[in-house]
Image (cartoon, rainbow, N blue to C red):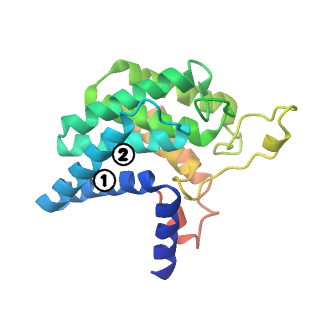
Amino acid sequence: RGALETGAAGLAASAPDLVRALTARNLAAAWALVGDTRLRDSSRSLAQALGRRLAGTNRVAFTDREAYVIAAVLEGSWTLGDTTGAVAARGALDRLLDRVYEPGQGVRHAVVGSVSGLLQDQVQVAAACLAAHRAFGDARHLDVARDIVLVLDRDFADPMGGYFDSVQPDPAAPALADRTKQVLDDVLPGANAWAAHVLFRLADATGDRRYARRGEATLAAFAGDIRGEGVRAATR
């Protein structure tokens, strides 16, 4: 318990919006399970507050964190039937896509002066697009998620299983020379675990079970390496 509390405190200090977003999502899921109106009201309040923050047009955002918050607000709002929070989050997502997404190339890490080609950015934006598609049925968001998955398979996939954290190294960017495959949770969910999450959601949205098989293969690639990791391997 002490380790969990310490980790949560560190996350809250470094990324309060991420904590609020995760809390709003989990409260909504808990309300759906047990029907306690206090959970519903708390989730709605958090989601609407985050929606107002997302509506700010001058936000300096890192793509992965912004997309995670957007997805959480969309998912929580959809569960609660809260149109206000969902509309604000969809608007924020569309603004983010306009600034960081390029068809066939995926998304950049930040709006200005960004590093390109990071796995965490791709999977968080794809997840946000799938959440928007579920909430509103907008074909554009589904198309973007599909396109990002194509980028994952082309630029990030390891033939041995899973996805690398960056694209093939650029000789001009030695800092990206050593690629790793992230699966454990940190400030954000583990990138490979979230890639599997995206693939399963995409399978549900399209009815194409090939996505589900790729999600299963992604998880299988790490099954022997995460024993004993505890909550760091418990992506939600």
Q: Position of residue 113 (x, y in %)?
A: 67, 30
N-term-proximal mark, 1 vs 2: 1
Circle 1: element type:
helix
Residue 93 appears in the rendering: yes
Q: Is residue 190 left or right of residue 201?
A: right
Q: Are marks 1 and 2 in contact (CB under 8 Å)?
A: yes
Q: Is residue 138 left or right of residue 39?
A: right
Identify the residue position indicated by label 1 in the image.
24
Q: Is residue 11 above or below residue 159?
A: below
Identify the residue position indicated by label 2 in the image.
72
Residue 214 appears in the rendering: no
Q: Residue furthest bottom?
A: 2
Residue type marked 2: Ala
Q: Is residue 72 above or below residue 88?
A: below
Q: Position of residue 103 (x, y in %)?
A: 56, 18
Q: Is residue 36 left or right of residue 100?
A: left
Viewport quadrant of the N terminus: bottom left
Instruction: Give 63 or 220, whichever is nearer the viewer.
Output: 63
Instruction: Give 236 or 199, whichever is nearer the viewer.
Output: 236
Instruction: Give 164 or 46, whichever is nearer the viewer.
Output: 46
Q: Position of residue 68 (x, y in %)?
A: 45, 44
Circle 2: element type:
helix
